[in-house]
Image: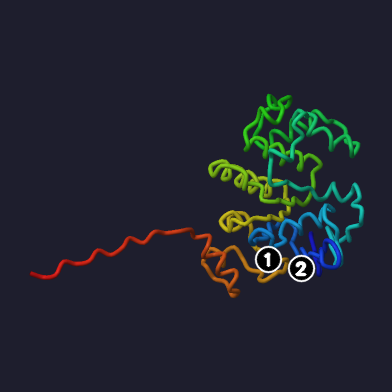
Amino acid sequence: MLDIQNLQVVYGTGRMRVDAVKNVSFHVEPGAAYGLVGESGSGKSTVLRAICGLAPITSGRVSVDGAAVTTPRSKAFYRTVQMVFQDPYASLHPRHTVDRTLSEPLAIHGEKDAEARILQALKEVGLGPSFRFRYPHQLSGGQRQRIAIARALILRPKVLLLDEPTSALDASVQAEILNLLNDLRRRLGLTYILVSHDLAVVAHLCERLLVMQHGEAVEETTADALRSGAASNTYTQSLIQASQGFTRVAPQTARAPAA
């Protein structure tokens, strides 16, 4: 469904040159969930932005469903690929109702039966018709992200690019959104690329993943290997160790000398 070959993204020139992504390659099968992990600044979000046309592709090839992407992206591309952004507080227009937010992509692509499509999209993300005419400030963080997911799904794409979709949410709401994404993938046959710095989130949602550091791909592994702590690369091992969190070790009390 998605094939990335030697992707390179460069910003600036000369002394101001920044190699954000350096010759990254991977492929994702139809219906699979693929993860990109790494510390902040590793280039994982830039890969997603390059795929959907929000970052320039300096060199390399991106193919979606067997067709090479063009610059600028075509309408057909956006019917196939949609993105869910990290911050639901910033990705929704504060002065647009949910109804306008969901109807806009339908109008752009000349789709009919907008009302039925909007109600169906709300139902798919677990929200009722009463949310249709609310503004973003009247929604919780989890509800906003559900609307963002509904907006991405309303054109019936095959691929969703998920840029840390739960990192701005509370822990309990994170679990709800992850379970929703899992359910939608199974029911609609979607293909996911998930960017996250949280290894537990990636292991929950994805089968395979690519570890990135300083814009480079350092290791491709599986979620099972991640759970078991198996990694051939030292950087991946350090990520696994860091994800296990801090554990306080109780100091040993000195024994009293025998009488």
**Label at residue 105:** none
SS at mark 2?
strand
* Extreme residue in the left direction: 259
Residue for point 62% across, 66% down: 222
The residues tagged by marks 2 and 1 sit, at their Cα atoms, a distance apart of 9 Å
Q: Which numbered marker is on residue 24?
A: 2
- Picture layout, residue 162 above or below residue 4: above
Image quarter (top left, top right, bottom left or bottom right) of the C terminus: bottom left
Q: Horizontal and vertical percent for residue 197?
A: 62, 57
Q: Is residue 232 above or below residue 9?
A: below
Q: Is residue 229 above or below residue 120?
A: below
Q: How is the image coloured?
A: rainbow
- Residue at 55% x, 68% y: name it: 238
Query: In the image, residue 43 lies at what x, y percent?
Result: 72, 61
User: Which numbered disc covers residue 212?
Assistant: 1
Q: In the image, what residue type sits under mark 2?
A: Val
Do labels 2 and 1 touch, CB within 8 Å?
A: yes
The image quarter containing residue 210 is: bottom right
Categorize mark 2 by other alpha carbons within 10 Å: few (<14), some (14-19), many (20+): many
| Image location (x, y in percent) of residue 128 | 67, 28
Amino acid at pointer 1: Met
Q: Nearer the viewer, residue 189 or 150?
A: 150
Is 111 left or right of 3, judged from the image as shown? right
Quarter of the picture containing the N terminus is bottom right
Identify the residue at image location x=83%, y=50%.
80
The answer to which of 61 and 136 lies nearer the viewer is 136
- Closer to the chain start, of discs 2 and 1, is 2
Mark 1 secondary-structure assignment: strand
Q: Residue at x 79, y 54 (%)?
A: 49
Side of 246 relative to 48 (left or right): left
